[in-house]
Image (cartoon, grey):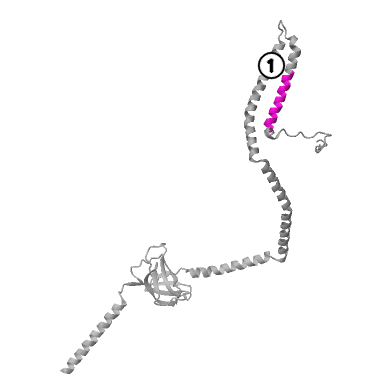
Amino acid sequence: MENKSHAFLAGLFAILLGLATVATIYWFGGKREATREYVVVTRQNVTGLNPQAQVRYRGIRVGKVSDIRLDPQDVRNILITIEVDSDVPVTRGTVAKLSYQGVTGLGHILLEETGKDPTPPVPERDGEPPRIAMAPSLLDELSASGKDLVEDAREVLNSAQDLLNERNRQKFAAILSNLEASSGQMKPTMENLNATLVQVRQLLNDDTIRKISRAAGEAGPLLVESRALVAKLQTTADKLDVAIGEPAAGGAATLMPRLNELASDISATSRQLNRVLKLIEDSPQSLVFGAPAIPPGPGEPGFVPPVPRQGGKP
């Protein structure tokens, strides 16, 4: 009887120990959620990716990698089986990328939504999980474009080597020598131009500009009054012509000589006034700097004969 009681206690202890073990495993294993399997298909290298690696959806951990193998139907493909929480919205527009964490180089699968097709994915074959295509990662794109960049750089270097051959280098040296000589010849010209600009600046100082402005302002009313005076002189001359032509009893014939002399003076004065007005209109600066010098005529010092044109005419 005593042996049976010891056997019963031993069996009860074994059962309790098993239940405690199961509870401990469940406790440390965390909450168990429903998952779905998907197969990521890629032809890229998956260096750094191992089973039990994390699967992230927009940066959130949503599952793990359960298996990595070659496709028996096409050995160029690599099949990566992943387990993802059932509440993750995986669609036909979802793509996978191989990403690496920090500086450790450990790879993980990153799921991203492109929004191209919101319908849920379906298995291509019965009994197989739905497939997700893997897009090229940043490193893959850099590797693919790096080869093209190297080829382009090689072509540029070859072109530069062809351009900078011995013959072209001699031409470039000759061009630089010509530029240096031209720069030396332009130096006196630039000095003369600077001196001319200094003289012009001294000539057109503030006092001269004020004088020109004052003269231009005074020339306007003077021209108006001069035009009015010419009109009055013309009217007076017309009246004198009429008076001289009238055969009056006293007769204006006795005054003809004096009137003719007066008319001549008035006409000469009018012509001289017209020349002054014309000179002021053509060159207002003459009020400040004086009338322009008359060019020398034939036989005078400084006379330059005109250049004859074709046909013998100047």
Instruction: Residue 191: give x, y in percent of width and height.
Output: 71, 50
Instruction: Residue 26: give x, y in percent of width and height.
Output: 29, 78
Horizontal side of 314 relative to 76 (left or right) equals right
Check the image and name the residue furthest to the top. Answer: 249
Residue placed most toward the observer, 311 or 267: 267
| Secondary-structure class at tag 1 | helix
Secondary structure, magenta segment, majority class: helix
Q: Quadrant of residue 109?
A: bottom left
Check the image and name the residue furthest to the left. Answer: 1
Residue 273 magenta-drawn? yes
Q: Quadrant of residue 281?
A: top right
**What residue is drawn where x is 71% and y is 64%?**
169
Q: Residues within 10 Å of mark 1 (few under 14, many from 20)?
A: few
Residue placed most toward the observer, 16 or 130: 16
Horizontal side of 1 relative to 161 (left or right) equals left
Quickly name the residue at label 1. Answer: 238
Q: Which quadrant: the C terminus?
A: top right
Find the magenta span and give its range: 264-283
Residue placed most toward the observer, 62 or 274: 274
Q: Which quadrant: the N terminus?
A: bottom left
Tell me if residue 6 comes above or below residue 230 in the rendering: below
Instruction: Residue 108: give x, y in percent of width and height.
Output: 42, 73
Residue placed most toward the observer, 153 or 291: 291
What's the residue type where badge 1 is placed? Asp
Q: How many marks?
A: 1
**What residue is drawn where x is 65% and y is 41%?**
205
Instruction: Residue 176: give x, y in percent of width and height.
Output: 71, 59
Horizontal side of 210 relative to 134 (left or right) equals right
Horizontal side of 291 relative to 305 (left or right) equals left
